[in-house]
Image: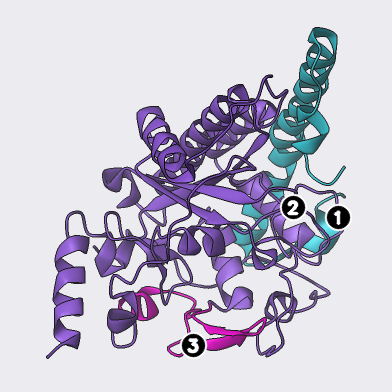
Chain colours: A cyan, B purple
Amino acid sequence: MRTIDQRFTRDTSFWQRLGRDVRLLWRMAQMLYAYLIIGRRIRQSYRAKEARGDVFWVDEELHR
Amino acid sequence: MKPHNPPPPTYAFGYKNPPQSGNDINGLGVKQTVRARHVFHNATGENLAWNALDEFFSQINVWGVVRYMLANVWQLRRQDGPVSQPRLEVDDPASMAAEIKAEAKTLGAELVGITRVTEKAVYEGFEVPYTYAICIGLSMDRAEMEHVPQERGAVEVMRAYREVSRIAIELGEYIRELGWPARAYGNPNSTDILHIPLAINAGLGQLGKHGSMISQAFGSNFRLAAVLTDLPLAVDEPVDIGVEDLCLTCQRCVIDCPPGAIFNEKQWVRGEQKWYVDFDKCIPYFVKTYGCAICIEVCPWSEPGRGPWLSEKLLARRGE
């Protein structure tokens, strides 16, 4: 499974399509959570550092 | 057009431990023909060298962009699907190509061209089991894009990606109803193929100095998607609209690029001498400005209505 898309597009029957859509909705919910909750912390931290003239280290602080 | 209050190329983010140069990963200076490797945008789960910056880019982006991205991910679930039976036999690939192009235009495409899928257009480690690529272009709203490198331009880019993806998805469904396998590749989620080499071969335009495509109708103010299929189709030829003639002397994008990422000369990249943008200079500014896009909008070809006139003048000058 090499791309996000390929995980969700090959299924054919009604139940397979339903399962595909539920899995995709779950993934989108995760993306939304990441942006709204985790991303909010990142955006706040980044803006604060920017205002102070500091640097936000993306390889160290993203998942802190 | 002039860029809309571009911020300076200084950054309050960065890598404490810098990754491998993106130019090295992209094959800058490499004279042997090798396939492209993923470097930045990533939907594969691979551990790419520049993953952290891509993730940071996603997290600091504006809601309008994220909203369109989610909508695009949702619609791309229809990019592939069951193929109808029986299969429509195709005796005349040329008339089938004309039918497919007409259908694409009906769905909203503004540029359509067909080419064979080449290995060069598929990322290293990936396989695309289709013969033909139907390349589709859709212009962006110039009034919105005049706001680059600000948020409004970024939102318009994602809106265009979503719309051109929809066209590709519906065209793919049309082909599958004819009984032939087809798969839509809608940017920016399409991680298997490189759209630009395909679109150039399909005659949608030429590569510009700024590393993006230039079409006669829209300059660089458009976005790409593609449908890959085995439906027998007549292919188009690459076009020469005079892009080289202008890019060799024009300095517009070079001057207006805040981080100075655009080379004045062609570079060796994966076995080919072509226009190339310095990844390591471009991407931090791209991240800071939600996708930048200054170079494609200041390009003289992107001025509405100017492309056909420019092309005519440039090509006529060759004969003088």
Magenta residues, start to end: B252-276
Mark 3 chain: B
Which disc, if any, is residue A59?
Answer: none
Callout 2: SS: loop
Is residue B270 visible in the rendered image? The answer is yes
Judge by depth and name the residue closer to the eye, A6 or B276: A6
- The vertical placement of A37 against B285, above or below, is above
Point out the frontmost of discs 1 and 3.
3
Write down the residue under mark 1.
B46
Please, which residue is most extreme toward the top here? A14
Dot 1 and dot 2 residues touching (CB under 8 Å):
yes
Question: CA gap, disc 2 to disc 3?
Answer: 27 Å
| Badge nearest the viewer, 2 or 3 | 3
**Residue lying furthest front in this view?**
B91
Q: Is residue B161 above or below residue B222?
A: above
1 or 3: tag closer to the N-terminus: 1
> Could you tell me the amino acid type at mark 3?
Lys
Q: Nearer the viewer, residue A9 or B2?
A: A9
Share a chain, discs 2 and 3? yes
Left or right: A18, with B116 as reference point: right
The residue beneath circle 2 is B42
Of residues B120 and B196, the one drawn nearer to the viewer in this rendering: B120
In this rendering, do the residues under marks 1 and 3 share a single chain? yes
Residue at x-position 60% and y-position 36%: B69
Separation of residues labelled 1 and 2 (CA atoms): 7 Å
Check disc 3 and report the residue beneath it. Answer: B266
Mark 1 belongs to which amino acid?
Glu
Amino acid type for the residue under numbered disc 2:
Asn
Q: Does the residue at mark 1 contact the one at mark 3 (Cβ under 8 Å)?
A: no
